Amino acid sequence: MTIEARHKIGHYVKLIMDEVFGRDRFRNDITRIKCNPKNFHRKGYGNIKDLILFYSKTATPTWNDPRLSFSEDDEERLFKKLDKNGRRYTTIPLHAPGETSQGNTSKEWKGINPPKGRHWRTDPAILEEWDKQGLIEWSVNGVPRKKIFLDERNGKKMQDIWEFKDPQYPQYPTEKSLELLKFIVQASSNEGDLVLDCFAGSGTTLVAAHTLNRNWIGIDKSEPAIQVIKKRLNDLPSHLFSTIEYEFLKG
């Protein structure tokens, strides 16, 4: 469940959402960059963002862990090293915070104990296998680190500041970015799931859900909004084995 709120009412909306879903179901507030900077003449800072509140209905929601592709700058900055085959990589420590009183992750490996207050990230037997496979890099001081290769990573984790700018020439006043809604739908649902938009507006959520093979329900009392939604749905491309089918219910 996500809801987008303008900056002046976001904190009020969150109180309502806490009451509906429960404070323990709140997962993120997300800043969404919605437009380019404006040069308004007002006593205050320019507003280029919206607030997205992310809640879940249950403690175990659908989560598809969306990722962003690495840019060329990311690749050079985050994976600075090259192996003998030209593969880009970086290294991370083999230990993690916290001491373990039981189990193998606190034991000595190759004559080395984890630093005080830390433990090995994995069983020393696995560390030994990694070392045999050339996946551990040893510093000149004999400090081991795990190699992480760029070509084995599926991108970088999405953070809580997004840049999905709204259409420059919207078909409806509150129309949002289609890519934004597709991103949200993909992250928190699977094909065949049901997506509900209680204030459908321009119908962007419905278009996103339909193109991603989700079922959907859209609700709006505005006649102009309904006309825009019907046009956008009817304009979606169809082919021999797929048609755009929906039922319009007027209350």
Image: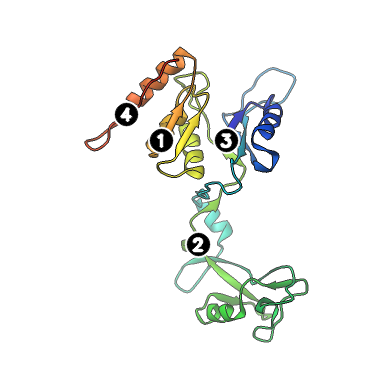
Which residue carries the number 1 mark? 215
Q: Which image quarter is the C terminus in? A: top left
Percent of width and height locating residue 100 = 72, 73
Tell me the kind of residue under disc 3: Thr
Disc number lying in front (1 or 2): 1
Which residue carries the number 2 mark? 150
Percent of width and height locating residue 91 = 60, 68
Tell me the kind of residue under disc 1: Asn
Disc number lying in front (3 or 4): 4
Q: In the picture shown, does residue 85 fall above or below 52?
A: below
Which residue carries the number 3 mark? 2
Mark 1 or mark 2: whose residue is earlier in sequence:
2
Question: Disc 3 versus disc 4: distance between alpha carbons?
Answer: 26 Å
Dot 2 falls on a residue whose secondary structure is helix
Which residue carries the number 4 mark? 245
Q: In the picture shown, does residue 77 fall above or below 21?
A: below
Q: Residues within 10 Å of mark 4 (few under 14, many from 20)?
A: few
Disc number lying in front (3 or 1): 1
Q: Residue at x 59, y 44 (%)?
A: 58
Query: Mark 3–mark 2 contact, CB under 8 Å?
Result: no
